[in-house]
Image (cartoon, helix red, strand yellow):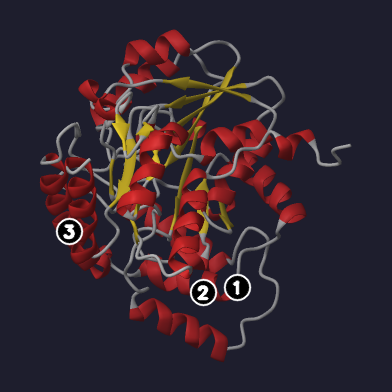
Amino acid sequence: MNKLSERIENLPASATLAMAAKARELKSNGVDVISLSLGEPDFNTPDFIKEAAIKAIEENYHSYPPVDGYLELKNAICEKFKRDNGLNYKPSQVVVSTGAKQSIANVCMALLNKGDEVLIPAPYWVSYSAIVTLSEAKFKIIPTLMENGFKITPEQLESELTSRTKLIMFNSPNNPSGIVYSEKELNEFAVILKDYPSTYVLSDEIYEHIIYGVKHFSFANLPNMFDRTITVNGLAKAFSMTGWRIGYIGAPEFIAKACNKFQGQITSAANCIAQRSAITALTAPVSKIKYMIDEFNSRRELIFDLISKIPGFKLLKPSGAFYLFPDISFYFGKEIKGKIIKDSNDFAMTILEQAKVATVSGDSFGNKNCLRISYAASKDEIIEAVSRIKNFLSNN
């Protein structure tokens, strides 16, 4: 008799973490694997942030912080929202959590009821659908095409909205495609949403600073949308603080209070030292992390040029984040090293086993034809990884 809950039995494992674990296992067995699977910057956390952590330890920050975060950090977040996004949140509208993933889970658990509907434009971050399922709501995927820039159209949004739609999850810049919605495009969605006053928007802006030649725009800045938008952000990506686990939301006050209540029963507050460091990170000028953004941009140009030369790969140049999301369906139905490639799962596993390069199947991101390739790796690793893939496919 199975003693586990249906909830956990029906919960898929994170595809990105599973592939990273597989790559680590191979490496531990002496296999020379290059990992382009995880969405994790390969830079060290900037020294000025590490120095703030040391200072916090020396000043004996060790007690439980308030569940929703230190007031000084919430004030810093409010100032950051105003400076970078033109949003006027109050500290009572901010909740600090153990990473943006927990922030998203808090929102879904606090806002959604059984049977509520959540719209998720694809491609999407792998955990969105799983978190919605855990909250006992239902998710509906809105598919997109590479030919349309992996963006949903206003007509698509309007056709999918119903009286049961409680939440829409937007992610711009997007993981895994790297697309960025413009102010004009987002405003077209806001106009449609005027007729659906009970529908909220979760705007995941974790990659806002990792952007190339275009402007990031926050959904909450649109007319009549501030009180219906939950803005999610964190320090993992732009500040190279993945393991520090600090995320946060700016939200209508009743949602923030509900998230605080939920978090109080699950984890309580985020790590106190990481919170003190986050104050320093968020109050520093954005120019202090520009060297990382510039390097990501240089890598983007490099990997796009290299992968464009692999036969059968169709590409869209990303405007943000640090991923490529090529269509590799050209290889479906073909035999590679005695194996028929049925889908992107097969393709990703084959190049891991044969070319020793870890990527992630697009299936878990809502697009079965694509493959997510992270360029949060050194240029030498990128050159070698793409060379391995190209040589493997050409010699098959």
Query: Which of 375/383 is in front?
Result: 383
Q: Nearer the viewer, mark 3 or mark 2?
A: 3
Residue under numbered circle 3: 383
Residue 19, horizontal then vertical, whole percent? 47, 50
Residue under numbered circle 1: 272
The CA distance from mark 1 to mark 3 is 40 Å
Upstream in the sequence, badge 1 or badge 3?
A: 1
Amino acid marked by disc 2: Arg
The CA distance from mark 3 to mark 2 is 38 Å
Residue 373, horizontal then vertical, whole percent? 31, 47
Contact (Cβ within 8 Å) of mark 1 with mark 2:
yes
Q: Secondary structure at mark 1?
A: helix
Give the side of residue 310 with respect to residue 72, left or right. left
Seen in the picture, residue 123 relative to 385 is either above or below; the reply is: above
Q: Secondary structure at mark 2?
A: helix
Residue 364, horizontal then vertical, whole percent? 47, 35
* Neighbour tally class for label 2: few under 14, some 14-19, many 20 plus, Cα within 10 Å: many
Contact (Cβ within 8 Å) of mark 3 with mark 2:
no
Give the side of residue 120 with respect to residue 109, left or right. left
From the image, which quarter does the N terminus lie in? Answer: top right
Q: Is residue 93 visible?
A: no
Contact (Cβ within 8 Å) of mark 1 with mark 3:
no
Amino acid marked by disc 3: Ile
Q: Residue at x 36, y 37 (%)?
A: 347
Upstream in the sequence, badge 3 or badge 2?
A: 2
Residue under numbered circle 2: 276
Give the side of residue 264 with respect to residue 314, left or right. right
